[in-house]
Image: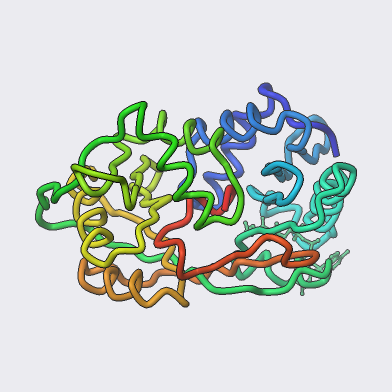
């Protein structure tokens, strides 16, 4: 296992493509810039055959993502070794609460390492047929950030302003609700390699949540849109149904260590990304 650097990114993105994941080459750059000492690759004969990334949110919470092993090298313990390298890095930072979003292939590997499931967030998909108009939302401006970061940290459990601002740079728009007055919700839509991706999206108000989903769908490109819908969130599930989303594959939020940082599926209508939380 060696540290991931920029020269690994093209091969890492090829592994991502082979797995059919929706992230982009820009997503790797973002992870590497935010946690340059915490992303690792497995190499054999100068060939990149595995990846894992970490991201630390202060000293309280860390996320593990982009766990990929080349199909020809699976079931030899490589995934477990990559995880152990990532965990050693995070434990050297004394971070006790570690989370990730697991695919069905990843889940048994993580369970053997002590991770426990918290809640499901199955990926949903829709291909928008009509373009909805933005409803009582507007684009975020610089002065909105304080309010947006406060809303987000209440929902996510810790502050993650650095990553939020980077995600906003890579999103066609970051919308806030309502268009006037104090901000009560916000949401992003990002371009992926397979589909547009909704998230993060936070809004406790039913009408506001509906406006935000309608508005982000209004800026989506005319291809599929993905939304990882927390299954213990009745509002998210009702809206997913209203807007025609259907489930396409399972995903499970898992935790290692104490639940010292809360993780409330009802507080988050859409996560930022499986590699980020
Ligand atoms: C998930 C993934 C990273 C696992 O990588 P891996 O290198 O196969 O992981 P490991 O070899 O450590 O463990 C996988 C299985 O092989 C078994 N295994 C480990 N060493 C073995 C060996 N020498 N011989 C046979 N089996 C072995 C493990 O016990 C484990 O079994 P289980 O699935 O029944 O629990 C890989 O399948 C992958 O890239 N999948 C696609 C992307 C993905 O879904 N990533 C997870 C994101 S959350």
277 up-or-down from 34: above or below: below
The image quadrant in which ligand 1 is located? bottom right
Quadrant location of the N terminus in the rendered image: top right
Q: Position of residue 125 (x, y in %)?
A: 33, 63
- Residue at position x 73%, y 37% from top? 39
Q: Position of residue 10 (x, y in %)?
A: 59, 29
Residue 102 vs residue 219: left or right?
right
Q: 97 or 7: which is nearer to us?
A: 97
- Residue at position x 54%, y 55% from top? 156
Q: Position of residue 105 (x, y in %)?
A: 65, 67
Find the residue positioned furthest to the front: 181
275 up-or-down from 250: above or below: above
Residue 27 vs residue 126: left or right?
right
Q: 2 or 210: which is nearer to us?
A: 210
Q: How is the image coloured?
A: rainbow
All told, the count of numbered labels is: 0
Residue 108 vs residue 29: left or right?
right
Residue 188 vs residue 44: left or right?
left
Find the residue positioned furthest to the top: 7
Q: Position of residue 150 (x, y in %)?
A: 48, 46
- Residue at position x 82%, y 46% from top? 90
- Residue at position x 59%, y 56% from top? 157
Q: 193 or 72: which is nearer to us?
A: 193
Q: 241 or 265: which is nearer to us?
A: 265
């Amino acid at each position: 296992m060696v540290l991931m650097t920029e020269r690994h990114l093209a091969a890492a993105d090829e592994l991502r493509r082979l797995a059919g994941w929706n992230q982009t080459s820009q997503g790797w750059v973002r992870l590497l810039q935010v946690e340059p000492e915490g992303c690792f690759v497995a190499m054999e004969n100068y060939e990149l055959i595995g990846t894992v990334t970490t991201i630390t949110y202060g000293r309280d919470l860390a996320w593990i993502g982009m766990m990929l092993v080349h199909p020809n090298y699976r079931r030899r313990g490589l995934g477990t070794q990559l995880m152990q390298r990532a965990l050693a890095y995070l434990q050297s930072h004394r971070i006790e609460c570690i989370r990730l979003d697991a695919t069905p292939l990843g889940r048994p590997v993580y369970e053997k390492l002590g991770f426990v499931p918290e809640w499901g967030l199955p990926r949903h998909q829709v291909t928008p047929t009509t373009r909805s108009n933005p409803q009582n939302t507007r684009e975020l401006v610089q002065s909105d950030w304080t309010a947006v970061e406060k809303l987000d940290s209440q929902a996510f459990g810790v502050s993650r302003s650095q990553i939020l601002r980077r995600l906003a740079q890579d999103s066609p728009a970051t919308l806030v609700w309502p268009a006037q007055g104090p901000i009560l919700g916000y949401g992003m839509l990002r371009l992926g390699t397979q589909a547009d991706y909704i998230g993060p999206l936070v809004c406790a108000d039913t009408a506001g949540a509906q406006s935000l989903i309608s508005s982000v769908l209004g800026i989506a490109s005319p291809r599929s849109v993905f939304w990882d819908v927390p299954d213990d969130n009745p509002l998210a599930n009702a809206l997913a149904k209203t807007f025609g989303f259907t489930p396409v594959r399972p995903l499970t939020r898992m935790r290692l260590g104490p639940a010292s940082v809360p993780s409330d599926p009802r507080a988050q209508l859409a996560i930022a990304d499986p590699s980020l939380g």
